[in-house]
Image: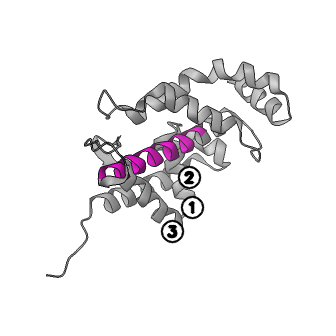
Amino acid sequence: MGDVTQMLISYGEGDRAALDALLPLVYDELRIIARGYLRQERSDHTLQPTGLVHEAYLRLINQQRVDWHNRAQFFGIAASMMRRILVNHAESKRAQKRGGGVEKTPLDEVAVVFDNDVVDLIALDEALVRLEKVDKLKTEVVELKFFGGLTIDEIAAVMKTSTATVEREWAFARGWLYKALTDKPQTNE
C-alpha cells in the first residue's frame, strides 16, 4: 500500500517513471472494481472489465489537477470514473435503442447490485445527482463505498473525517437512495 501512495505522490510531482511502476500494483484491484460493476451484465456485454479498467486508468493518469495523497483516494477517483464511463455507455446504448444508431438490436440496461437488488445504473446516477444537490458529502461517501469498494476506515482517511461520521453518512445515503430508487412517481388520474 505504501508503494502505491509513494508512486502517486511521485507521479503528482512529475515523475513519469512512477506511473509505469504504478499500473502493475493497482491493476488487479481496478479489475476487481470493474468486475463488480459488470457482474450483473449479460456475458456478451460490449464493455468488458479489461476495457473499463483501461479507460478509467487512462483518464486517471491524464488528470492535471489532482493532488495525489494515497491509495484510497486513487481508488475512490477510479471508482467515480468507472461510474461515469458506465453511465455514458448505458446512455449511449439507450439512445441506440431509441433509434439513434444504425443497428436496431435490443440491449439490456447497465445494472449493478445494491444490497441484493438489481439497480439501473442510469437511475442510480440520476438519484446520486439529486442527492448531491442535497448533500455532496453523502454522495462522495456513496461513490467511495459503493463504487470504489473502500472500507469505512479508508473512506474516513480519504475524507479526513471520523469513521462514525462516515458510517452515519453511509446509513443516511443508503436509505435515501433506496427510497429514491423504489418510490414510484404519483400520477393524478
Type of residue at label 1? Lys
Q: Residue at x 24, y 66 (%)?
A: 184
Residue, far front:
102
What residue does disc 1 label?
136
Position of the N terminus by quadrant: top right
Q: How is the image coloured?
A: one colour
Q: CA distance from mark 1 to mark 3?
A: 7 Å
Q: CA distance from mark 1 to mark 2?
A: 6 Å
| Mark 3 nearby-residue class (10 Å; few <14, some 14–19, many ≥20) | few
Mark number, residue 140: 2
| Drawn side of residue 107 relative to residue 77, left or right | left
Q: Residue 185, relative to residue 43: is it above or below?
A: below
What residue does disc 3 label?
134
Q: CA distance from mark 2 to mark 3?
A: 12 Å
| Mark 2 nearby-residue class (10 Å; few <14, some 14–19, many ≥20) | many
| Residue 107, position as x, y percentages in the image | 28, 42
Type of residue at label 2? Glu
